[in-house]
Image: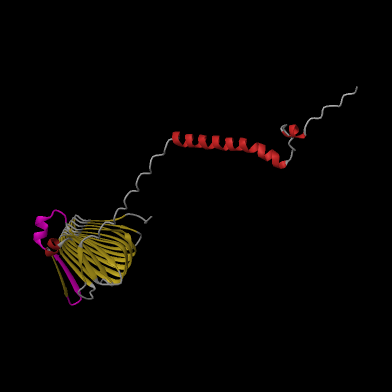
Amino acid sequence: MSRTPLVRPRHAERGRAQPVQQGAGSGAARRSPRNTWALLLALVAGVAAAQTAPVPPPAPPAAPVQPAPPAEPGKVYAPGPFDRLELAGAARVLLMQGDRDQAFIAGDADAQKGVEVELADGQLVVRTTGGWKFWHSQKVFVKVEMRQLRQLSVSGASDVQVPGPLQVEQLKLSISGAANVRLDQLQARALYFGISGAGEGHFGGRVDEMAVQISGKGKVVADRLQAQKARVSVSGIGNVLLWVTDDLTAHISGIGSVDYFGSPQVQRSISGMGSISAKGDKR
């Protein structure tokens, strides 16, 4: 007697796991959990690092911008055109050639009270009074700008500086007292300079001719001022140092001295214990 093989019912096969087809979609599906875990771990690590990393200190605040210093207090005087200047008293004066005629007096209202400024017949007079000198140890500062300068008179104990170029046809300069005048870049046809007292004059530049007259204890230092012709007269104990190229006429009465650079033709006259000496060529 033959046996019939047992046939499993089809519903039993349904419970068995079916083989999964390998393909692109199924591989990506299998890797998705791993990628998700990796991404989560990276985020956790980043958060932990951000929490543990030191926070840099805030940048220091920018330094405040310092305001520009205020302009020097003072007052400008422009009463009209002038080509002559008179300085009386004690002041520090800066003189420059420009395109206007005016004077600036430094200082507040109290300082202005100690200075008088007047204009008459083309001459500007700047006079410092004794009140300013008494109450203040420093001299008042005066800045003068002029288009042309024909005459400069200084009396008292002022210090006058002309550091820039000064071009004039001729200049008459006189000092009485103990004033000091310095012109560094003078260009002129003629310079006439006189001292009565103990003043000093220092010059640089070039002139065609110059005349110097000293009575008292004056001093002239003009070895930087090239002059073609010069006439010098000293009475007292004055001292003159010149640079002359062509002709020099020197007269001394007293114990003054005249020293000169260059090789000019010299006419000399000495009365007393004065001296006239050549210093050689200018180098």
Q: Position of residue 149 (x, y in %)?
A: 26, 71
Assign the N terminus to one quadrant of the image: top right
The answer to whether residue 171 is left or right of residue 40 is: left
Q: Quadrant of residue 202?
A: bottom left
The location of residue 137, given as percent across then percent down, is: 14, 53
Quadrant of the drawing holding the C terminus? bottom left
Task: Write down the quadrant of residue 168 in the picture.
Answer: bottom left
Viewer-nearest residue: 247 or 242? 242
Residue 128 colored magenta? yes
Residue at 82% from the left image edge and 27% from the top image edge = 6
Does 193 sit left or right of 55 as displayed? left
Q: Residue at point 38% right, 40% down?
A: 57
Q: Nearer the viewer, residue 44 or 68?
A: 44
Can residue 55 be found in the magenta stretch?
Answer: no
Q: List the single residue furthest toward the top.
A: 1
Magenta stretch, residue numbers = 120-138
Q: Is residue 200 left or right of residue 52?
A: left
Q: How many marks?
A: 0
Residue name at image x 48 percent, y 37 percent: 47
In the image, residue 235 lies at what x, y percent? 17, 61
Q: Residue furthest front?
A: 1
- The answer to whether residue 261 is left or right of residue 270 is right
Q: Quadrant of residue 263?
A: bottom left
- In this view, the residue in front, 213 or 163, is 163
Can you say whether 107 is above or below 85 in the image?
above
Q: Residue at x 45, y 33 (%)?
A: 52
